[in-house]
Structures are given as C-alpha cells and as structure tokens.
Image (cartoon, helix red, strand yellow):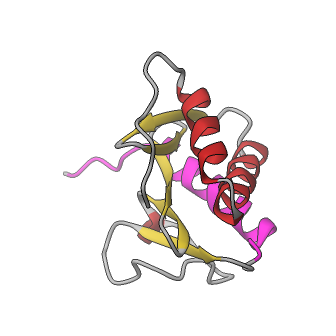
Amino acid sequence: MNKSPVPKGLTPTQLVDHRIKELADWRGKMLSEIRALIKTADPQVVEDWKWNIPVWSHDGLICTGETYKEHVKVTFAKGAKIPDPKSVFNASLEGNARRALDLYEGDKIPTVAFKALIKEAVKLNQAKPVKKK
C-alpha cells in the first residue's frame, strides 16, 4: 500500500486516526473497529505508534495493527502463550511467540472472543515471571 508520509508532531492517537482516515476503505473501518474493541476490552490500554503502525500495550506489548492491500493483520506479541479456545488466530501459527488474526474484506471480527484474547494478553503481561532455581 502506498502510505502517505507520517505527519510530524502528532500524538500516537492522532497518528492512528490519520492512518484510518488515509485508508478510506474497508481496511480503515476494520482498523477502527479493532481499535474500539481493544479499548473496550482494556480501558487502560496505551495506544502508541511504532514501526509506522498502531501498537497497543498494557504492562507490555499486546498487539499491533498492520494494514496491507488485501487484509488487516492484528499480531499478538505473545500470542502463542495465550489460550485461544475459539480459534480466533488464523495466521503466524507456526512460531513459538506471535500469533495473528488476518481479516479480509467482508470478514466479521469475533468480538467476544477477540476481547477475551486482549484480556488474556494483558493478564499474561501482568503475570509475575517464574524464577528459575
């Protein structure tokens, strides 16, 4: 996708707003819906802008929102460690760290299961590390 140059001096939230607006198609609407679900699932989430994409975190990285020509990808940084009983993850399944959800035009986000993944990611970020003996 030909993205316009990232405007200087904007807050991360304004940069995400800019990305949604510049898409001006189903991908912008999808990214906006993803963003709203994340904020609903975790009202304390921190929205940031890294690697030229939206990033959401709470006590550590939760997920990123990437847009491509044919799909929108939500990548969970620690997705391999998050329970996914509804099989929401449909991409990056082979690795031992990340998991992703690829969404295409016309797809519906499984809202309840997606919000559960966000909550599980926050819980994982907040878990105390096990000390090795």
Instruction: Count every numbered label the image shows and give the total.
Output: 0
Q: Would residue 105 appear left or right of 72 to someone viewing this image? A: right
Q: Residue 51: percent from the left, percent from the top?
A: 34, 43
Q: Would residue 69 appear left or right of 95 to someone viewing this image? A: right
Q: Would residue 41 appear left or right of 54 to someone viewing this image? A: right
Q: Residue 25: percent from the left, percent from the top?
A: 69, 61
Q: Nearer the viewer, residue 26 or 117?
A: 26
Q: Would residue 64 appear left or right of 88 to someone viewing this image? A: left
Q: Residue 18: percent from the left, percent from the top?
A: 60, 37
Question: Is residue 66 positioned above or below 56 on the image?
Answer: below
User: What type of secondary structure mainly makes up the magenta span?
Assistant: helix
Q: Residue 5: percent from the left, percent from the top?
A: 40, 37
Magenta-highlighted residues: 108-132
- What residue is drawn where x is 44% and y is 61%? 1
Q: Which picture quadrant has residue 72?
A: bottom right
- What residue is drawn where x is 36% and y is 46%? 129
- What residue is drawn where x is 42% and y is 55%? 2
